Image: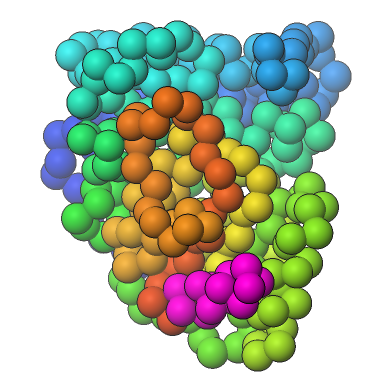
Amino acid sequence: MFITTSVPQDRQILQLVPILTQASQILLDEYQNYCAGSEFNIDKKDDHSPVTQADLKVNAYLLEQLAIITPDIPVISEESDYSKRHEWNVCWMLDPLDGTKEFIHQRDEFTINLSLIQDHQTVLSIIVVPTKKNMYLGYLTELPYKYTFREKTWERYSGGNAMASEPIQVGLSHSSNNPKYQQYITYLEQYHPVTRREAGSAYKFCMMLEGEIDIYPRFHPTSEWDTSSGQGLLESIGGGLVSLELAPFSYNQRDTVLNKGFIAFRDQVSQKIAVDALSNMML
């Protein structure tokens, strides 16, 4: 649950909000033009994943703006060179369009993810949802904010929407065809009614903050820029995200930016349910 609050007085947040609001508008304009049938460029990267002109436009804008407000902090971006990242103890981590496939399929569940990494931990997390005109943001040690562009209103997480005992709301991607997902849900259903909630990209983390998803299992790979912001926001409200070996992800530390599977949970109640189901599934 989010409740109305005053404008935060943190300098860094106040610098980032207008920049990300503009980035959101750039992305939304690109999406609307694409849906209207305007000429639109879609390419393939080396890993055969799609990249669009929208990814690149938002990336260029945010790299430019971050260089202005934090010139000493480098950026690990999905769409830029980060070959020197292991030299960086502090860095931004950016996905200018998380949910490119959702975008291409004209589903409005795509986001901009930005986080600040310090000593391999996410210390500031931001997820922007352009089509909803919302931004979720906050520091690891504080309850997060929700900013609504249209009304220019601020809300803050109140902690008042603890998970009800039933049903368990499980977040799934639209393409969750791996049989492990059904196996996991089958274990959950032995003890709890389950409601499935399909959504794309990091938008599922926003749904968790809103109390619409309790557990989010992922059994296929992601990248660090897909999870960093969501993990930070969940940890700030008493939830979290752990690997299938039950260890929280750390960032800009491993040889690869690819993650293996994970389980995300909204609070301690859902954590126990999520981990118990995973343990049973792995037996």
Left-right relation of 37 to 120: right
Q: How many marks?
A: 0
Q: Is residue 37 above or below residue 3?
A: above
Please check the rendered image and state whether residue 107 is part of the magenta-colored stretch, yes or no. Answer: no
Question: What segment carries the magenta color?
Answer: 271-283
Residue closer to the observer: 157 or 80: 80
Left-right relation of 254 to 201: left
- Measuring 63% from the left and 23% from the top, which residue is drawn there? 29
Q: Which secondary structure class fits the magenta region best? A: helix
Left-right relation of 151 to 281: left
- Measuring 21% from the left and 35% from the top, which residue is drawn there? 119
Taking the view exactly as shown, the residue that stands out farthest to the front is: 283
Expressed as whole percent of the image width and height from the top left, the position of residue 272 reads 46, 79
- Measuring 56% from the left and 73% from the top, which residue is drawn there? 279
Expressed as whole percent of the image width and height from the top left, the position of residue 159 reads 33, 73
Q: Which quarter of the picture shows residue 1?
A: bottom left
